[in-house]
Image (cartoon, rainbow, N blue to C red):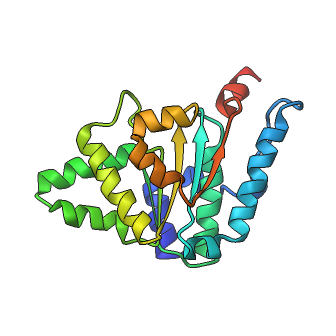
Amino acid sequence: MSRNSVRTIRTRGIRYRRCRLSNYKIYDEPGDASRQQSVLAAVQDYQARVGQNLAEGCGLMLFGPCGTGKDHLLAAVIWEAIHVYRADVLWIDGVDLYGWFRDRIDDGELESELVARFTTPEVLAISDPLPPFGELTRYQAEMLMRIFDHRYRHMRAVCTTINVEDRDELDTRITPQVAERLVDGNVCLFCDWKSYRKSRRRG
């Protein structure tokens, strides 16, 4: 296993180690399953050209309600980027990202050094860069803007999953400036179906 794979598993957890597009489940109601199928097909197309996409700075954003399998789809693309294209990937959870910010401030690390940690990797993947409750603080929004704007200007891909109901909520909660940099030039897919975890509990 590559060092990059070990780092990714350590930061995101072993649950995502075996996530592939081939084992992603289409579970929506038969009449509505086309929504999942169309998103899966779009992710398959992105993955098939992931080397070219990353070279062009084209990222992937999966947004929609909680529990729809967005991180599974993202993980499948990340593993392809790591194992087939040997891409340097940093994948982190949004909550851990903000904890990292706080810890580094306490350690006295310069903001420029902190930002560099997230602008240097070829691919930055963030699972839901929104706080679980409320809005971003001003500091969080400023740091995200610095990171995403730097990557946007230097054409370095950002791949994200975001738990929001629609684009309006995305703009409101992450700020329009940050949202624009996550949308422009990237493949953005709306995962608008019921939660897999909730459907499994009901079953």
Q: Residue at x 28, y 62 (%)?
A: 115
Quadrant assignment, res 56? bottom right
Residue 64 on image: x %, y %: 60, 37
**Front residue of 99 and 165:** 165
Residue 119 falls in image quadrant: bottom left
80 on left or right of 161: right
Using the image as rendered, state which of residue 94 and residue 141 is in the foreground. 141
Image quarter hosting the N terminus:
bottom right
- Res 24 seen here: no
Q: Which residue is pictured at 57% across the width and 65% down the height?
A: 58
Q: Position of residue 155 (x, y in %)?
A: 47, 70
- Tell me, yes or no, if residue 30 can be seen here: yes
Report the residue at 61% width, 74% height from top: 83
- The extreme left residue here reads 108
Q: Residue at the location (35% across, 31% down)?
A: 135
State the image coordinates of residue 7 (x, y, percent, origin top left).
Answer: 44, 66
